[in-house]
Image: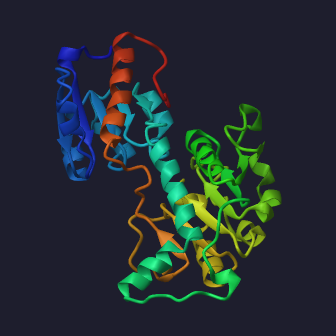
Amino acid sequence: MFPSKDRLNICFAHVAYRMQDRFALRQAGIDSFELRTRDELDARIGDADVLVVSGLWRNELVERARRLRFIQSIGAGTDQFDRDLLAARGIRLASASGVNARAVSEHAMALILALSRLLPEARDNQAKRFWRGMIGDLCRREDELGGKTLLIVGLGRIGGRLAQLVKAFDMRVIGLRRDPAAGSNGADEVHGLGKLHDLLPQADFVALTCPLTPETEGLIGTAALAAMKPSSYLVNVARGRCVDEAALIRALTDRRIAGAGIDVTHEEPLPQDSLLWALENALITPHTAGETRRYEDNVLDILMDNLDRLWRGEAVLRNQVV
């Protein structure tokens, strides 16, 4: 039985997000508390009926979560949760899918623009107080997006929104998704993931907006990078493990592709000794594509919707995973 409103206790667990502050403004009449570290979560997980969490989660917490009935993921990804374990313990799980679709697609668009307009180089030159002169070599100049082809891997909410954005720049869009019959979602054409290597040679930009699954893990590796144009760019706003990072470093170092915009990496934070830091043709952002000033409120909207469903005894949650 899911606890009634007057008996419910919500734990917000995140290293930075101000979930508790934003929740308090709603005056929902529900008890809650906020934690910032894994040690704090270890100590107090037993007090929570509902847990709102993402990166601080570890599956062994289930053993101490004696009251836990529902987990609302703060992020869209839920690969950190053992679904079978949660199901066995009767703990429901919902993702925050769609909460950052606009933000992540805009971030991917920003990376595409930054790479095509050589903005990282301009920022580096600014730091050096160097005014670059006009360039005779066509291959070294800024470029225009009109007429270019973007290959989007993953045509869900984020990929579909990105397709709409790049259309405003007169780009051609090819989409890849697990089930092409689910629709083009703004792309000019759509294919299954199995067509990736056939389509890579057509792409001026390749954007990863897919979830991390066994099918997408390591999807962009040595063979895929070799199939891309030397003038093309990779943009990853999905998950770091969708890309073979060592293969990407080799491709960027050897200029087998023109560059990459990377918001996610295998290990986060990116280790200080990673070779990615020193590559001038790599633009790195610290997994901030989904972060906006509205993020907490967007997550809370999903949480409150799901709490209402649980109180009504509904079988299906919004963005249900378990």
Coloration of the structure image: rainbow
Near-viewer residue (169 or 11) = 169
Is 276 left, or right, of 313 in this rendering? right
In the displayed orientation, state which residue is furthest to the front.
134
Instruction: Please determine whether, in this image, residue 2 is positioned above or below residue 99.
Output: above
Q: Is residue 128 visible?
A: yes
Is 214 left, or right, of 228 in this rendering? left
Residue 222, image x, y percentages: 70, 71
Q: Quadrant of residue 50?
A: top left
Q: In which quarter of the image is residue 45?
A: top left
Name the residue: 48% across, 43% down.
Answer: 102
Is 43 left, or right, of 146 in this rendering? left
Name the residue: 34% across, 42% down.
Answer: 295
Q: Can residue 77 be seen in this view?
A: no
Near-viewer residue (166 or 205) = 166
Q: In which quarter of the image is residue 94?
A: top left
Instruction: Please determine whether, in this image, residue 198 is positioned above or below residue 308.
Output: below
Near-viewer residue (297 or 125) = 125
Residue 184, image x, y percentages: 72, 38
In the displayed orientation, state which residue is furthest to the right.
198
Quadrant of the snapshot with the N terminus = top left
Residue 216, image x, y percentages: 64, 52
Name the residue: 37% across, 50% down.
Answer: 291
In the displayed orientation, state which residue is furthest to the top.
312
Q: How many labels does the image show?
A: 0
Residue 264, image x, y percentages: 48, 61
